[in-house]
Amino acid sequence: MPGMGTLASGINKTAAIDMQLADPDYLSSACNNGRYCVMNGYMVVAGRSDAQGIEDINGHNGNYYNSMMYAAHSQCGGSGCVLIVNPSGYRTQNRFHIHYRHFDSRGASLKHRLQSAVCEEGGWHSGGFPCGGKAKYFDGFPAVFSAAMGSGSISGSSVTVWPGSCGSGTIILVSYGCSIEHSISAR
């Protein structure tokens, strides 16, 4: 791939990263600074050993997780970006992490559907979103996990964040028991 670079062994960097991520404890060993790490150009990883997944987020520790979402937003905060957290059973790592990336045409289609449903209406909306999901529009960029908990329990859910929605706001989509990561982006 152009621009990816090649390691001495001839394996491109993306393939090398994918091989490392095959070890479910790779992120745990790579980031343990007590805060978080921005890694591999597409993820923010929790630096605390007690941060294994979205199921660990609650009202007492939400600010820690919100800080990581702010970090992901600082890496990819434009209208073509999506920030993704996968639920237990739909992730390969034993450490909480947020993917940030640009979505593809499938993601653009979903974002358009979300905007059509929530930009002009307050509150959480459901019906026709992936995995029985609920979506809500927020002005600016909110404390995402605190906001998502307003939809009900987020344990076992996927949280997908769409910055630059409805002009200058954010849409949060909470989906249940699935991951939509590979259906909205090429990576």
Image: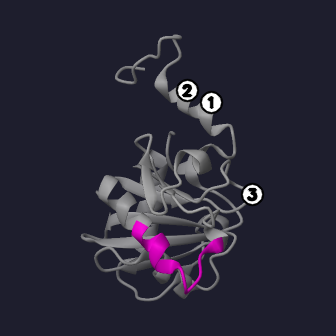
Q: Is residue 48 left or right of residue 56?
A: left
Q: Residue at x 54, y 32 (%)?
A: 17
Q: Residue at x 40, y 86 (%)?
A: 121
Q: List the residue tagged with mark 1.
A: 19
Mark 1 residue type: Met
Residue 171 in the image: state x and y as whole percent: 41, 72
SS of the residue under disc 1: helix
Q: Residue furthest front?
A: 33
Residue 161 in the image: state x and y as whole percent: 45, 65
Q: Residue furthest right?
A: 89
Mark 3 residue type: Gly
Which tag is nearer the camera, tag 3 or tag 1?
Answer: 1
Looking at the rendering, which quadrant does residue 60 occupy?
bottom right
Which tag is nearer the camera, tag 2 or tag 3?
Answer: 2
Residue 27 in the image: state x and y as whole percent: 58, 47
Residue 54 in the image: state x and y as whole percent: 61, 68
Residue 65 is one of the magenta-drawn residues? yes
Mark 2 residue type: Ala
Q: List the residue tagged with mark 2.
A: 16
Residue 117 in view (yes/no): no
SS of the residue under disc 3: loop
- Which labelled disc corresponds to residue 89? 3
Q: Which residues are magenta?
A: 56-67
Mark 2, Cα crowd under 10 Å, few <14 / some 14-19 / many 20+, is few
SS of the residue under disc 2: helix
- Mark before the other along the chain sequence, 3 or 1: 1
Q: Is residue 99 left or right of residue 76?
A: right
Label 3 to label 1, Cα distance in Å?
20 Å
Residue 4 is one of the magenta-drawn residues? no
Task: Say which of 2 and 116 sits in front.
Answer: 2
